[in-house]
Every structure is written in structure tokens, then in C-alpha cells.
Image (spheres, coloured by chain):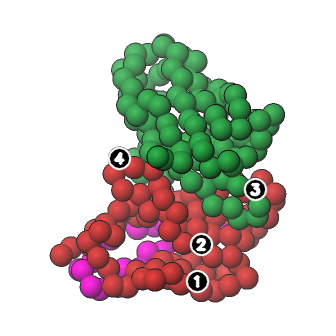
Amino acid sequence: DQQVKQNSPSLSVQEGRISILNCDYTNSMFDYFLWYKKYPAEGPTFLISISSIKDKNEDGRFTVFLNKSAKHLSLHIVPSQPGDSAVYFCAASGRSGSEKLVFGKGTKLTVNP
Amino acid sequence: DADVTQTPRNRITKTGKRIMLECSQTKGHDRMYWYRQDPGLGLRLIYYSFDVKDINKGEISDGYSVSRQAQAKFSLSLESAIPNQTALYFCATSDSGLGDTQYFGPGTRLTVL
């Protein structure tokens, strides 16, 4: 059973516009959420995170929104740049003390010049 | 220098061979992880270790074993490689604490013929 779902395998946007990547989760014990970015031939790199006590976290062009009641989070990139083209993974962890991350399958973002 | 290194970066082997993938980190983190990435399946946890004396199975541990030789070193072995173990393998590290961020190595591309 997939606990973290990224239902869009790919997304294409124009440079300068907003990119919105979505993620849904099923486990109500998750209380910490992260987004990772991955370029080809490289390992995933941490982008931004949010704790369940917040509903928004912003870092430059990147903002993550969390809707706990809907078990949904989204990553907004404004404005999108061609260098943002990558695969984005959503991940979640719970308060079990194990702190294992559960990853979604990823969304490939393409930003067209 | 990279904080998390993996060797080899690429490996082609034959069915039935024993393979070892190595991971080293200079971040001083206690926790280390091994993941595999397959197209369309995201990142799946194979094994993880919270300290030198701790080894835990992840989501897909069958056919794999690990050794935590030191705080900084965590190796993954395929005792008898099979073609469906062809994948990208990533090592990651994290510091202790709730909701800790994981830092990934560059990956090893393994092909089993």
C-alpha cells in the first residue's frame, strides 16, 4: 500500500510561470514532510521541509503548503526556471522514533524556456 | 569533497556473482541508509542503521545484506545477484532527531546480466 502518492508522473511549465507539484499521504502518523530534487546521474538533494505544526514554509522561490485535514501537500516554485527541471520526490516521516522516510514515486518537472 | 561517497559509481556483473557496494560519509552522522531506485517506483528502503551496532531491514531487504563497519562506513552486499536487482542504489545519512533530513550519495548504477 502506497503511503505517499505523487499522482502526476510528469509536469511541464513555461519559464517564469508557477510550478505546482502535489503529494498525498495516507498515514495520519506522518508529521514531517520533505521535498527532494533529483537531477540525472546525481543523488537526491534536500529542497524544503515542513512540520505538521505549520501549514506553510517558504524558502526563496520554493513554498510548501500542508493541508493536514486533506492529507495533502504541495510544492510551489515561483518563478520557474529551466534549471528547476528535475524529478521531485515527496517524502514523509512519523513520530515513531525510527524517522524512516517514506518516498513518493516522484514527479518529473520540465521547465521550458 | 563530497560528504557522502559511493563506490563504484557503475558496475556491470553477471547473475550469481557476489557484489559489494560501499558508502562512506564525512558528515559525522550516526544514521545510514541504503535505497534502490527503479523507474516509476521511486526510492525504496533496503536497510538502515542508526548506529554501528544497529542494523534494520527496510521495505525490500530480501536478497541483500549490509555491514556497518564504522560510523562512517556502510556497505551493501548482493550475495548472488539476479537481473531484477538491476537498479540505481543510493546511500544516505542523517543526524538523530525528529524529522531529520537525509543526505544522499551520488548513486551506484548496477546492471546484472
Q: Which numbered marker is on residue A49?
A: 2
Q: Which residue is mark 1?
A: A57
Viewer-proximal residue among B103 and A19: B103
Find the distance from the CA under tag 2 to the CA under tag 3: 16 Å
Q: Which numbered marker is on residue A41?
A: 4
Look at the image and tell me in which quarter the C terminus of chain A lies. Answer: bottom left
Q: Earlier in the sequence, mark 2 or mark 4?
A: 4
Q: Tag 3, which secondary structure?
A: loop
Stretch of the chain drawn in magenta: A5-26
Q: Tag 2, which secondary structure?
A: strand
Find the distance from the CA under tag 1 to the CA under tag 4: 29 Å
- Have a look at marks 3 and 4 and say if they share a chain: no
- Have a look at marks 2 and 4 and say if they share a chain: yes
Find the distance from the CA under tag 2 to the CA under tag 4: 23 Å
Residue at the image position 76 percent from the left and 64 percent from the top? B98
Viewer-proximal residue among A108 and B1: B1
**Is residue A18 found inside the magenta-colored segment of the image?**
yes
Give, as a three-letter code, the residue at label 4: Ala
Give, as a three-letter code, the residue at label 3: Ser
Give the chain of mark 2.
Answer: A
Give the chain of mark 4.
Answer: A
Task: Bin the neighbour count of mark 2 within 10 Å (Cα to Cα): few under 14, some 14-19, many 20 and up.
Answer: many
Viewer-proximal residue among A10 and B13: B13
